[in-house]
Amino acid sequence: MRGRMRRRSPSVNALDPPTGCIKDTGGRTCRPAHSPGLTNMESVLILGATSAIAADVARLYQRRGARLFLVGRNHDKLRALRTELSPNTVVGHATADLTRCDESQALVARAIQALGGLDTAIIAHGLIGDQLQSERDFAEADRILAVNLTSVISLLIPLANHFEQQGSGHIAVLSSVAGERGRPRNYTYGAAKGGLTIYLQGVRSRLWPAVGVHTLKLGPVHTPMTADHPKNRLFAHSPEVARDILAAIDGGVGEAYVPWFWKPIMGTVERLPEPIFQRLGFLSGR
Ligand SMILES: NC(=O)c1ccc[n+]([C@@H]2O[C@H](COP(=O)([O-])OP(=O)(O)OC[C@H]3O[C@@H](n4cnc5c(N)ncnc54)[C@H](OP(=O)(O)O)[C@@H]3O)[C@@H](O)[C@H]2O)c1
């Protein structure tokens, strides 16, 4: 399957050389009327900022002169990131458990106020959880759904309303290839990410074309989330993934596989007929 190759925007070229191409999934490509990614003073809210990938995204935004509001759950990790970044970059921060959905609206409003507006919101928090436990105990399944889906929706509601009223901006959310086809290894997490991908398709069409809504479908990445997972050559590195995320936002890509090679892989996996899928133990087994 061939996808359209996209050039990186000038603002991304100003950083390091590209490490991979972002390909549209064949769906509609976002072309926001206003693209603050091309200016030097964009205001960016990063939710789940202490995730390894989000921290690398924050580093890239600092290098192009953005102003950031960082939200993380772990106070010490958030302080370490703030200390590493310049005070001129981090104009505000909040420590929050993002599954407290009734606080999401106020949290988003606080960030917008501190930044004096908002150009881009990135939602990065996530949890794989314990798949086997989630099959025995609803509490674990509920926890996985709450972190990866419900809490994200609680943030997307005020964010989408803000950007709709503003008539410009970007929302970028980290989803996963695990959401493309259910597998015994991680289907509770996959269901949450798959639901998130569908939800974002709706938000994208609702806000089209003024606001860019970007779904980043990540393959496995070397981060604390996968620290105890068996590794293979398909694992990507966080700094490269962060660069691809910014390229997708700047390039107006609605749905991007990161790295790009997951597009042909998942195109094949999704279309495998059930009898064949069930015979392929590396896909349908534990
Ligand atoms: N790594 C991969 O292979 C991979 C693949 C596909 C998609 N993704 C997605 O990429 C995103 C970033 O993950 P990562 O790989 O960078 O993993 P990570 O370093 O483990 O980051 C996960 C982050 O989510 C935060 N988090 C979890 N529950 C939270 C809650 N209730 N409230 C607030 N924050 C919470 C964690 O905060 P604490 O530090 O407080 O625990 C942590 O900062 C996630 O959405 C993940 O699902 C990752």
Image (cartoon, rainbow, N blue to C red):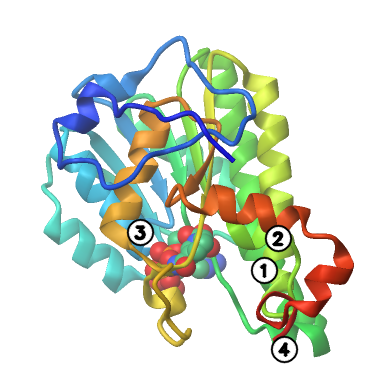
Q: Which residue sits at x=45%, y=25%? A: 252
The amino acid marked with disc number 2 is Ala
Q: Is residue 222 left or right of residue 267?
A: left
Which residue is under mark 1?
189
Q: Tally the marks.
A: 4
Give the CA separation, mark 2 to mark 4: 16 Å
Label 1 secondary element:
helix
* Res. 132 mark: 4
The answer to whether residue 60 is visible is yes
On the image, the x and y values in percent for residue 253 come to 49, 30
Labels 2 and 4 touching (C-beta < 8 A): no
The amino acid marked with disc number 4 is Leu
Give the CA separation, mark 4 to mark 1: 11 Å
Position of the C terminus, as image quadrant, is: bottom right
* Label 3 near ligand 1 (CB < 8 Å): yes
Give the CA separation, mark 1 to mark 2: 5 Å
On the image, the x and y values in percent for residue 277 come to 79, 70
Give the CA separation, mark 1 to mark 3: 18 Å
